[in-house]
Image (spheres, rainbow, N blue to C red):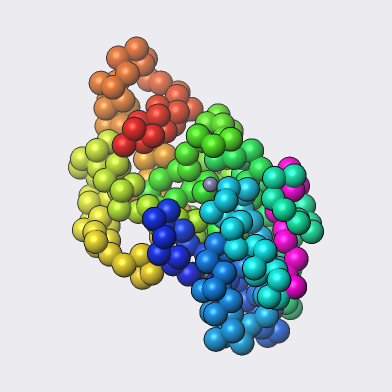
């Protein structure tokens, strides 16, 4: 599988992706927004985009569907519950469904509610697995739940699904928020050396060349994976004096999400 990450360069800081089968040249476009760039990259590489996958229904993840489909004839795939909110969906998918691209690429659909209630992450079971996480998991952060989401569902998605994936899984999120997210991590854990070192590396960076983190790295610098850390809990109890001394992990997650909304 060939992965092409496309930096849109917009204020929302979106990444678009093309995943291609090297044998057949067939490609899947994930969350196309900048259709010109997506089509240009496919043309340059000699690929034919046959499918589009929208991780969820937000406008900045579906905005290029119509133009890409018109230019290529690609079929549109989305969560089975999102088809009423995304125009012209050809295939609705749920947990465990497989998207085949050409002869060599197979992508497993994970049903990952939270950011919205109809959100799909794609998992490639390649030698080193790859997760296309949309707006569920960001580098050093988690999706917000302000536009049709639910924080309890997001917590369950993190604990029941994302945290159980192989540690060497590479993470390909829908946006570049890494700099701001690492600053948030350091606001919660000022002595987190992994976060400090990575922030140093990416500060003022060109997102087109952003590093790709693994889940093992996320476990070290992403507060939403570090729910049992004493420093994080102690900090939260300053912000929320009513918190018990040992809050459960879900409460820690919810309070972190609340503070990140204000960050
Ligand atoms: Zn979104």
Say left or right for 37 vs 102.
left
Q: Quadrant of residue 68?
A: bottom right
Decide: is 71 above or below 148.
below
Q: Quadrant of residue 246?
A: top left
Residue 84 x %, y %:
75, 44
Q: Which residues are magenta?
A: 73-83
Residue 107 x %, y %:
67, 63
Say left or right for 105 vs 157.
right
Q: Is residue 180 magenta?
A: no
Q: Residue at x 21, y 40 (%)?
A: 190
* Residue at the outermost top position: 242
Decide: is 70 above or below 120.
below
The quadrant of the rendering that contains the N terminus is: bottom right
Residue 219 x %, y %:
40, 47
Residue 24 x %, y %:
70, 84
Say left or right for 229 vs 130.
left
Q: Nearer the viewer, residue 60 or 252?
A: 60
Q: Is residue 77 magenta?
A: yes
The quadrant of the rendering that contains the C terminus is: top left
Q: Residue at x 50, y 56 (%)?
A: 174
Q: Residue at x 45, y 65 (%)?
A: 8
């Amino acid at each position: 599988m060939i992965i092409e990450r496309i930096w849109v360069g917009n204020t929302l800081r979106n990444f678009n992706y093309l995943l291609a089968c090297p044998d057949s040249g067939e490609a899947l476009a994930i969350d196309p927004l900048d259709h010109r760039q997506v089509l240009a990259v496919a043309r340059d590489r000699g690929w034919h985009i046959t499918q589009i996958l929208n991780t969820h229904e937000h406008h900045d993840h579906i905005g290029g569907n119509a133009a890409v489909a018109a230019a290529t004839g690609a079929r549109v795939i989305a969560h089975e519950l999102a088809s009423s909110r995304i125009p012209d969906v050809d295939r609705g998918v749920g947990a465990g469904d497989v998207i085949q691209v050409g002869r060599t690429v197979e992508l497993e659909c994970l049903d990952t509610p939270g950011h919205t209630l109809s959100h799909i992450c794609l998992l490639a079971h390649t030698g080193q697995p790859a997760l296309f996480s949309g707006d569920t998991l960001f580098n050093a952060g988690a999706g917000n739940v302000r536009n049709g989401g639910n924080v309890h569902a997001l917590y369950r998605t993190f604990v029941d699904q994302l945290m159980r994936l192989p540690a060497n899984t590479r993470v390909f999120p829908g946006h570049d928020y890494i700099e701001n997210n690492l600053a948030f991590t350091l606001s919660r854990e000022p002595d987190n050396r992994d976060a400090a070192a990575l922030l140093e590396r990416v500060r003022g960076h060109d997102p087109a060349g952003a590093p790709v983190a693994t889940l093992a790295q996320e476990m070290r610098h992403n507060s939403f994976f570090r729910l049992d850390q004493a420093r994080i809990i102690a900090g939260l109890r300053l912000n929320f004096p009513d918190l018990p001394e040992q809050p459960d992990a879900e409460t820690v997650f919810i309070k972190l999400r609340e503070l990140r909304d204000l960050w």
